[in-house]
Structure formats: C-alpha cells, structure tokens
Image (cartoon, rainbow, N blue to C red):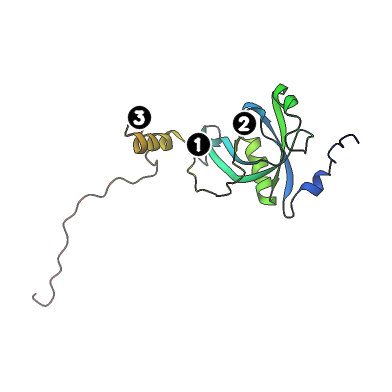
Amino acid sequence: PPPQAPQQTSLGVKTPPGKRAVTAMIDKLSAVGGLVSPGDYVDIIAHLSIPADENNSKEMKKASVTLFQNVLVLAVSANMQPGQGMEAQQQAASLPITFALDPQEAGLMTFAEEHGKLQLSLRSPTETDAYKITGASWEALADYIKTTQGTDLGISKKKEKNSKAPAKETQPIEIFRGGQ
C-alpha cells in the first residue's frame, strides 16, 4: 500500500490547554534563517522603539529584550507538520509563524510586534530552562564586554535627569543639656 500523508489536525486541536494560537509575521533571517519548524521551541526577542521619557513620546530609544522563553511553534505559514515545507520557507522573505502563548503573553507579543520587530532564537529540544536575561542596550553591551573581556568600550551610563545635587558636607550639631 502507498504511504499515507500525515493527517492535518486543526490548529485549535494542536493548541495546548490554557494557550492561545497567535501569529506574527517574522522576516526569514529573524526566523532562524527560515529553518524554524512546527513543534520547535523558541525564545522570542523584541527589538523595540520605546518613548525616551513618559512626557515626550516623540523621542524614541531602542531596546532589545527577550520577551518570552521556551515558546512552542504551532505552525509556519499554513504548515503544522514538523520538518515539512522547508523549501517554501527558504523562498519567502517573511513568514507568518503561529505560537502557543498564554492570554497575557498573546497581548504583550501583539503590542511588541506593533512597536518593533520580533526575532526568534531556536532552542534545543532538550533544554527547557528559563533564564533571567538583562535587556540589551549600549550600556548592557559595554558592561558585558568589560566583564567578560576586560575591554572598556567607553560607554558610560546616563545620569538621571532628576538626580539631586550632592548634599553639602555639614558639621554635626552638638546639643548640650544640663551643663554637659
């Protein structure tokens, strides 16, 4: 008998309980060169444009942060089968990738996609650990290079605008009571 094609199950059936299927458009290079596949687990990194301060939303600063770790890829384009459709993925400039996220994460990822660019980092199937990861900035990069390689990039941390001037050095006041 001829081999049977794998059965396509609906996306709703493939979505784990408590999760929501959420699709984001990711360019091929940011989708691990288009090599991400349904069933893979990824970390989702956001490159965001953030208002420089709460009063001036016209000035923007850039930040890169790991939004979520160990996220299940449910589908790439309309493909829900692991390892299939890779040739088509290699031809596309960008890919609609569907993730399994909890409801709060779904909203946050949609917001991040609206205000920046998403990138994926592919995980080993045996690694499920989550890490506390510092957001990426010029200061964070300079600190990392100095700590790991001993090289100072000459990038200093910006001083707070609202920082108070240092207090003047004063002499302590002595109070004498009862003739002491």
Q: Which mark is residue 32?
A: 2
Going from the N terminus, do you reach mark 1 or mark 3 first? 1
Is the N terminus in the top left, top right, bottom left or bottom right quadrant?
A: top right
Q: Residue at x 69, y 46 (%)?
A: 106
What percent of the width, then of the height, locates residue 93?
Answer: 69, 23
Q: Residues within 10 Å of mark 1 (few under 14, many from 20)?
A: few
Does the image show residue 157?
no
Q: Residue at x 39, y 44 (%)?
A: 162
Q: Residues within 10 Å of mark 3 (few under 14, many from 20)?
A: few
Q: Residues within 10 Å of mark 2 (few under 14, many from 20)?
A: some
- The answer to whether 108 appears left or right of 52 in the picture is right
Q: Secondary structure at mark 1?
A: loop
The answer to which image quadrant residue 99 occupies is top right
What percent of the width, then of the height, locates residue 139?
Answer: 41, 36
Q: Secondary structure at mark 3?
A: loop
Q: Residue at x 51, y 48 (%)?
A: 131
Q: Amino acid at mark 3?
A: Leu
Q: Find out whether the residues at labels 1 and 2 contact each other: C-beta distance under 8 Å.
A: no
Q: Amino acid at mark 2?
A: Val
- The answer to whether 61 appears left or right of 25 in the picture is left
Q: Nearer the viewer, residue 29 or 118?
A: 29
Is the C terminus in the top left, top right, bottom left or bottom right quadrant?
A: bottom left
Q: Residue at x 80, y 44 (%)?
A: 11
What percent of the width, then of the height, locates residue 127?
Answer: 57, 46
Q: Distance between the Cα atoms at labels 1 and 3?
A: 23 Å
Q: Distance between the Cα atoms at labels 1 and 2?
A: 30 Å
Instruction: Determine which residue is flagged by label 1.
Output: 52
Going from the N terminus, do you reach mark 3 or mark 2 first? 2
Q: Nearer the viewer, residue 62 or 38?
A: 38
Q: Which mark is residue 153?
A: 3
